[in-house]
Image (spheres, rainbow, N blue to C red):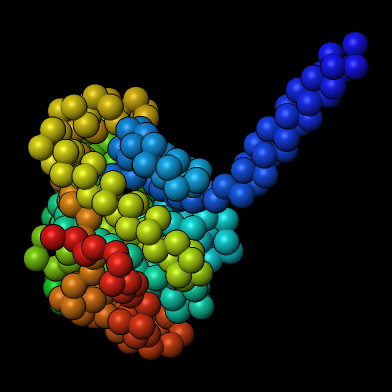
Amino acid sequence: MRTVILRRGLVALFAAAVSFGAIVQAQAAETLRIGYQKYGTLVLLKAKGSLEKRLADQGVNVQWTEFPGGPQLLEGLNVGSIDFGVTGETPPVFAQAAGADLLYVAYEPPAPTSEAILVPKDSPIKSVAELKGKKVVLNKGSNVHYLLVRALEDAGLKYTDVQTVFLPPADARAAFERGSVDAWVIWDPYQAAAEKQLQARTLRDATGIADNHQFYLATKPYTEKHPDVIKALVEEVRAVGEWSKANPQQVTEQVAPLLGLPADITLTSVKRQGYGALFLTPEVVAAQQKIADTFYQLKLIPKPLSIKDVIWTPPATVAKAP
């Protein structure tokens, strides 16, 4: 009888130990919090699930949070609600100027046709120069903010020659549909949706005036503590991007339901996107510095910035991109 009781006691003790071990392991597990938008390679990476499988071996969980635009995403990065995210060229400039503790980790190749200045189908406006004195709606501090500045400059206008109206994409589209504004500066997939659903005309895209890079950014503390996780993340983003570039139709079938958009609109967005994440080069840093200098000169940010000071340099143990 004593033997049976002893065995039962050992079984109970073992079960308790296993349960305690599981609790400790769960508590010890790291969580990588990723911010993404309704477009881009991170949407595909989330759907694929390959990152979760790879990081599980390192005891890292992955948590995803969607944001309506780059400025909102970087605010999340700044306040510590996410560790990593992707935005266009301009949001990191505004975030750095506001004191955000972020680092540029990687970038996607240029995608200049994936952002544009749109006007209604029946608008009499035929050129950027004709926007003088007109109302132009855009998401403040987003990638298209720089597109507008450059397009106006290229047309011989000053930034102050137009009336800027700052609204997030959904509200901007509503204003555009109502006719409350004369033009809308926007990116894909909102751009493609407006072209297809509203027959909006492209007045000017970024070709020849802006690269429209997508940047992957992370908080400085996270990159310093988890360089191997950042390396794995960039590698997975690059792999998904290369597959996407070669398989636009399959990407469309996968992403359209996630975006809640028809296949033809999604396919247009997919084809216009840049793919293949790389660590930053001096040329890309210089281009980003030009954007920062431009916004400082326009007094849209309060101080000059040094982009090279916030570039993540992978440790020697982290293999660089080919």
Q: Is residue 78 visible?
A: yes
Q: Position of residue 8 (x, y in %)?
A: 82, 18
Indicate left or right for 33 with 227 as reference: right
Can you say whether 187 is above or below 23 in the image? below
Closest to the observer: 53 or 107? 53
**Disc count in the image?**
0
Q: Position of residue 282 (x, y in %)?
A: 18, 78
**Residue placed at 30% from the left, 82% from the top?**
308
Residue 140 position by quadrant: bottom left
**Residue placed at 45% from the left, 70% from the top?**
224
Q: Position of residue 300 (x, y in %)?
A: 41, 78
Q: Residue furthest top?
A: 1
Query: Split into 4 quadrants, where in the image is the N terminus?
Result: top right
Closest to the observer: 172 or 115? 115
Q: Position of residue 223 (x, y in %)?
A: 43, 66
Indicate left or right for 26 with 270 as reference: right
Closest to the observer: 113 or 21? 21
Q: Is residue 287 visible?
A: no
Can you say whether 259 is above or below 310 in the image? above
**Residue placed at 79% from the left, 30% from the top?**
13
Residue 21 position by quadrant: top right
Query: Split into 4 quadrants, where in the image is the C terminus?
Result: bottom left
**Residue placed at 18% from the left, 72% from the top?**
281
Closest to the observer: 288 or 184? 288
